[in-house]
Amino acid sequence: MSGLIADTTYSNEQVAALEAIDEHANATEREYHDNYVLSAWGDSRMYNHFINGESKGYGYAQSNYEDFITSSDPGSWYEQIEGRVGYVVVTDVESDLSAGSTHS
């Protein structure tokens, strides 16, 4: 995977996230949907392309990611994404957003 990533313009943080997820998914023998990566809409296809090869659609991330990171009820989201999402990528900016959110 590293050779493919080196030919692109992904940030060091994105590359580190890809490598960590890929390593964990391989070590635990996760397959699609258990290795689906929920991330910001613009990054969803990239992460899922490298991790599980399922990058044709990004509607799930587009429809759910923002509500997920700004939710004040993580328990309900766990129930919703269980069996559908294996990994979640959150940036520092999004982490700050979710920490101060009152969205439900």
Image (cartoon, grey):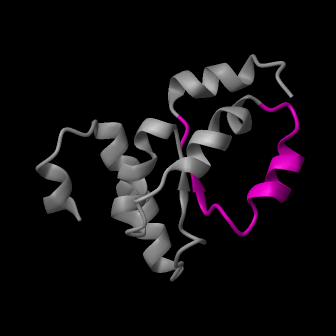
Please identify the quadrant where the N terminus is shown: bottom left
65 w.r.t. 31: above or below: above
Residue sitting at x 37%, y 69%? 53
Where residue 34 sits, quadrant-wise, is: bottom right
Please identify the quadrant where the C terminus is shown: top right
Q: Which residues are magenta?
A: 71-90
The location of residue 32, given as percent across then percent down, is 53, 74
Q: How many marks?
A: 0
The location of residue 36, given as percent across then percent down, is 54, 63
Q: Nearer the viewer, residue 59 or 88?
A: 59
Residue sitting at x 80%, y 56%? 80
4 w.r.t. 91: above or below: below
77 w.r.t. 1: above or below: above
Residue sitting at x 51%, y 32%? 91
- Horizontal relation, residue 86 to residue 7: left or right: right
Where residue 103 sits, quadrant-wise, is: top right
The location of residue 37, given as percent across then percent down, is 53, 56
The location of residue 64, given as percent across then percent down, is 67, 42
- Horizontal relation, residue 37 to residue 12: left or right: right
Is residue 91 within the magenta segment? no
Residue sitting at x 31%, y 47%? 15
Where residue 43 sits, quadrant-wise, is: top left
